[in-house]
Image (cartoon, rainbow, N blue to C red):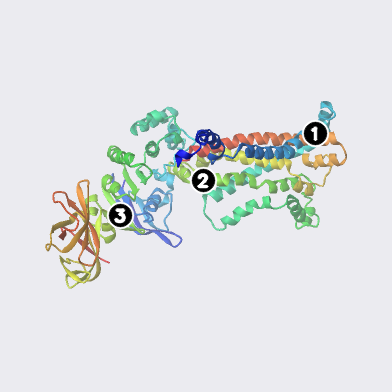
Amino acid sequence: MTIEVRNLVKKFGAFAALDDVDLRVADGELLALLGPSGSGKTTLLRIIAGLDWPDSGEVFFDGENALLRNAGERHVGFVFQHYALFRHMTVFENVAFGLRVQPRAIRKDEAGIRARVKELLDLVQLDWLANRYPSQLSGGQRQRIALARALAIEPRILLLDEPFGALDAKVRKELRQWLRSLHHEINVTSIFVTHDQEEALEVANRVVVMDKGRIEQVGTPAEVYDSPASAFVHGFIGESIELPVHVADGAVRLGGEKLALAAHDAGPGASRLFVRRHDMQIGPAGAGAFQGEITHVRNFGPVQRAEVALSHGKTVIEVDAPRDRELRAGEIVGLNPRRYRIFAA
Amino acid sequence: MTMELPHSLVLTYPKEDGRLSALHNDPRTEPRAVRIAIIGVAVTFLGIFVVLPLIVVFAQAFSRGISAYVMALGNPEALSAIRLTLLIAAISVGLNLVFGLVAAWAIAKFEFRGKTFLVSLIDLPFSVSPVISGLVFVLLFGAQGFFGPWLASHNIRLLFAVPGMTLATLFVTFPFVARALIPLMQEQGTQEEEAALSLGASGLQAFFRVTLPNIKWGVLYGVLLCNARAMGEFGAVSVVSGHIRGETNTMPLLVEILYNEYQFVASFAIASLLAMLALITLVAKTILERHLDEGKLSHDH
């Protein structure tokens, strides 16, 4: 099922949670809504689910106006951040709920319901927990039961609000891969909300980066990482070095000094220069666009991280360098960005 | 310097230490004497102010033997008072259950203007003296009252009759169910209801299958306290009852009347019923509180 959102606006008092949002989701996609808290991503998800209503704008499922239908009629599976499992029901009854509340005419008989619940519990590999209560489950198990419950109604769309937010790091990693393969298996158009960029980039086919109620960029994980469309996206995704520069007549200046960098298509005026930490190459003194002194080196993991005090503008930056060349504190080096982007400030 | 310390001191020190640590080194407890004194004061106080009166009530009720006790309760006046008390309690508890549920639902699950005001309004019956509550109804529905002439012209009799007593009880016991449910429902939030709705449940299905089971112990708790107060209410009911014997006397009112007429056995026999109600309420309350705590623990993660 395709989802299309047009000119969506939602205000809570004076705060604009969604400010003219447009989005298209293709059939079978696994989409991530990524942004800091307060960026409007959960509000967007809740409006698609029918749990919130926009002040203005439209939502279409397969070209059909979804705002004419309430949450129950939209056949949307929603997995809540804190799972919202029915605490007084067993796991089995939780999963069966959506089947039991169906109108009598289309409701399955008891045997049909049992078979379907069994099937779903097998899918999430938790059939042995059928008679437990939610309070007796671990976080990861609750998460999977919440998913099984949402899938019981054979949703046309699956929406997940911070699906891994409340889990510890190890369980989180396992569930990420599991969600990917599950999506591959059931192939339902799915959207999940996250504030964790790693999660978004690792799990989703496409990532929607949001900030302050607006969509900053939509693209594949590679696109948003390698070609950020705005200063916000560059700063939010991946680790970046940010320098305040000034562009005039095609020249880029930092602290008044001209850098040996092309301004490309950056407009004149105060600007922000972004470089990925690992895109800053460390070379001999005198070579490269920047000069600086290494003040501190930390060796861990696959790279070594050097703190460099730039001679321009008295700023200290952190650079990730490969470990093939040993760096020492006190060394004077030249730095050259392999790739960089300039955005208007 | 250490060499010069008296040998005995060094030897006795560990013994002293063992005893001292038991008394003083544990910061969580007080010396035994202090503990005994505090517990003693509490027990004595409870004994004099709670247990003793209770014993006196039953002692007086049975002072002329069991047959006198049974006779007192079998008296038509007493039977009518018991019937009336049960009737008024049933109506008030039933209506306040519905009002309380609706009010708690509105306050806990929706955001709207004037919510704080509504919450304070619910507490009003707790902060007003019951006698005043009764007087308010006299002022509203009495012969010289606000609605008095209209009611008289339509031949409707509220005051000094069962409807007025029910209204007064209703007013006084209104907060119990709502008060028991608001914090519970606020803590539980709306996510489970949202989940139910997104799974295709109708509003009613969500209420009966998700909301109500989640708050059932709270509801019972509120009903229990509401019932205890409805049966025991004296002040407000006394003002609006008119004390018509055999007609508008509830159990608490009859206790006073009989006592003033020096019919101590009869008076305390009725009082013993109210005391038993209190004891049963107490036990039931303890059981319900345990269930409520368990409920809290089970979703406390």
Name the outermost residue toward the front. B4
Between marks 1 and 3 in the image, the one whose residue lies nearer the viewer: 1
Dot 1 alpha-carbon crowd within 10 angstroms: few under 14, some 14 to 19, many 20 or more = many
The image quarter containing residue A328 is bottom left
Marks 2, 3: nearer the viewer = 2
Q: Is B258 left, or right, of A145 in this rendering?
A: right
Mark 3, Cα crowd under 10 Å, few <14 / some 14-19 / many 20+, is many
Assign a secondary structure to mark 1: helix
Say what amino acid the circle numbered 2 marks: Glu
- Mark 1: amino acid: Ala
Q: In the current view of this chain or complex, which residue is farthest to the right?
A: B261
Report whether B297 appears left or right of A261: right
Q: Position of residue A145 (x, y in %)?
A: 39, 36
Question: Disc 1 marks which residue?
Answer: B269
Q: Residue at x 72, y 48 (%)?
A: B167
| C-alpha gap between disc 2 and disc 3 | 33 Å
Residue denoted by label 2: B187
Q: Residue A52, can we see it?
A: yes
Subunit that carries the residue with mark 2 = B
Q: Nearer the viewer, residue B1 or B65?
A: B1
Image quadrant of residue A172?
A: top left
N-terminal of the two: label 1 or label 2? Answer: 2
